[in-house]
Image (cartoon, coloured by chain):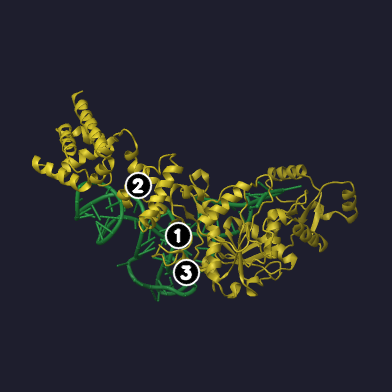
Chain colours: A yellow, B green
Amino acid sequence: MRPACLSHRVSPSSRGGLHGRAGSSAGGIPQTERCRSMSGAVRVRFAPSPTGYLHVGGARTAFFNWLFVRSEGGSFILRIEDTDVARSTQESLQAILESMRWLGMDWDEGPGKDGAAGPYFQSQRMEKYREFSSRLLASGHAYRCFCTREELEDRRAASLAEKGALKYDGRCERLSPEEVLSLEAGGRPCVVRFRVRSGVTSWQDEVKGRIEFSNSELDDFIITRSNGTPTYNFAAVVDDVTMQITHVIRGDEHISNTPRQILLYEALGEALPVFAHLPMILGPDGTKLSKRHGAVAISHYERQGFLPEAMANFLALLGWAYDGKREIFTREELVRKFSLERVSSNPSVFDQDKLIWMNGQYMRELPSSRRHEMVRRFLREEEGMNDVDTRGDWIDRIVDVVGDRMKVASQITELAGFFFEDRVRYDEKARELLLSGAGTSELLLKVAGRLESLKDYGAVSIEEAIRGLAGEMGLKAGELIHPARAALTGKTTSPGIFDVMTLLGRERCLSRLRDAADFAASERAS
RNA sequence: GUCCCCAUCGUCUAGCCUGGUCAGGACACCGCUCUUUCAAGGCGGCAGCAGGGGUUCAAAUCCCCUUGGGGACGCCA
């Protein structure tokens, strides 16, 4: 309802990067900056191509779109850019939709949700692209080009060799109508190119401020391929126009596409949407985040036992901040507080440690039943444990005992793996501990003896017994506990030792304690 | 190579538009505390305005240059 393109960011030049002098449009062509959003409801879109999973960067883009439209009130359109038939797959589509849903993003129009602006698959919108292509051809904004790929490549290479520009030289633009006719008659395949006018193209970016390109930087780009399908820039504009998209919110790798798209809007006589280019998400090495940096698929995080609300919260903070102090927000708060004005213009590095921390924050607020579920699922699906449900209660108790040490479900392995393994493996520190003390072996045997003689084997009585034993021996409880921990878990850190003893069960405790006693004694002897 | 974007602790960032508060918070890290270890909690610490010029009484903040990083230059999206 607010007049988006006029009121936002009253002084955009402050966002830095204003190098162009305002109003100096060299070509003297007035920029049409009417905005669609002035006339109606906000409509935004997320337009993935189904050629893989939903990755962190895409998810962040989608989420900012979603957050924006939910905070403004409007429609979120999910459009599938599947014009690359060779690479698009049904599995990818499903995977992307699933990750979207997992993160809690619902769409108002798109796959499974028909609307007036459909269809929502580009592969089903070919007539529209053809129609707009002929319109541009008829109005003289576009022309046919008969150059072959080979010719183009040769010229590009030659130009490159002379350190020239890599742009199309526009030779087919100069073809006479007769030549075009005869070429067509000869059955020579052709593409349709957009005729880029001279001058300057600029826009007021919602996050970057004013951006300006000289059209001489652009060449006459292809809008329709020789096989009749539209290229990305063209399809995107036709769709955004026909779907009445008011705000284009996307990654800033699209900045260089924007002048071309604006020129297309202009030629079509359509009002421009508001553009908002989000800073990119980088890997720890400072380059664009990709699989090289490790896990980038949202589904990976789901499988590892991250919580969707934590993931969403974390994604929201990648390039957006409320006041720099508060960081934990419910989804409702995010919707309420989100605004494009507070999106920063500099790129951010994806910090897994902080994600883990944040997930831990959400994890400890969870009812234990939900933590049980998450761990069971992780064990079953990721660790291939097939008796998870027959041992369910026992596993649930382990999860309880692990408590908030577990920040992500997958950490159950490192935190409590010793419960599930038949034999303990001593890590470096445990080894040292078992081997260092003088009477360690004897201590362990005494602990074992005490546990063996317990009538009632439970956490409370175990604790009493161990502390009692320590007292009798004139030792501090810790002097018994530490070697016992090493013996039972193979590590020097673990959940509370009495809980460990309880859940491990008397038999396994006794054998592990005796094994460790043997280990301590034998190694010392040799 | 050309064009574009970006520049505050190691990382995410607040502060910049509307110059003047010890440059604030969080993750990570390091202490202390609690404690059977770890985790969590509490308390404390380390650490930053890329550099250089301007403008100004005053610059992280406004302007210019340099440097650095990133992105885009396809009949991919």
Q: Quadrant of the rendered structure where residue A274 is? A: bottom right
| SS under mark 1 | helix
Both on one chain, marks 2 and 3?
Answer: yes
**Which residue is labeled 1 in the image?**
A313
Mark 2 nearby-residue class (10 Å; few <14, some 14–19, many ≥20): few
Alpha carbons under labels 1 and 3: distance apart: 12 Å
Q: Is A519 above or below relative to A470?
A: above
Residue at (74% x, 42% y) in the render: A154
| Left or right: A494 as drawn, with respect to A74 | left
2 or 3: tag closer to the N-terminus: 3
**As shown in the figure, which amino acid type bears the numbered disc 1?**
Asn
1 or 2: tag closer to the N-terminus: 1
- Asked if marks 2 and 3 touch (Cβ < 8 Å), the reply is no
| SS under mark 2 | helix
Alpha carbons under labels 1 and 2: distance apart: 32 Å
Measuring from the top left, give residue B74's x and y in whole percent: 70, 49
Measuring from the top left, give residue A48's x and y in whole percent: 61, 54
Mark 1 nearby-residue class (10 Å; few <14, some 14–19, many ≥20): many
Q: Is A14 above or below relative to A164?
A: below
| Left or right: A292 as drawn, with respect to B38 | right
Front-lying residue, A240 or A221: A240
Measuring from the top left, give residue A57's x and y in whole percent: 53, 53
The C terminus of chain A - image quarter: top left
The N terminus of chain A - image quarter: bottom right
Q: Residue furthest top?
A: A526
Q: Is A84 above or below relative to A323?
A: above
Q: Quadrant of the rendered structure where residue A230 is? A: bottom right
Q: Which is more foreground, mark 1 or mark 2?
A: 2
Task: Tell which subunit mark 3 falls on.
Answer: A
**Which residue is labeled 3 in the image?**
A337
**Which residue is labeled 2 in the image?**
A393
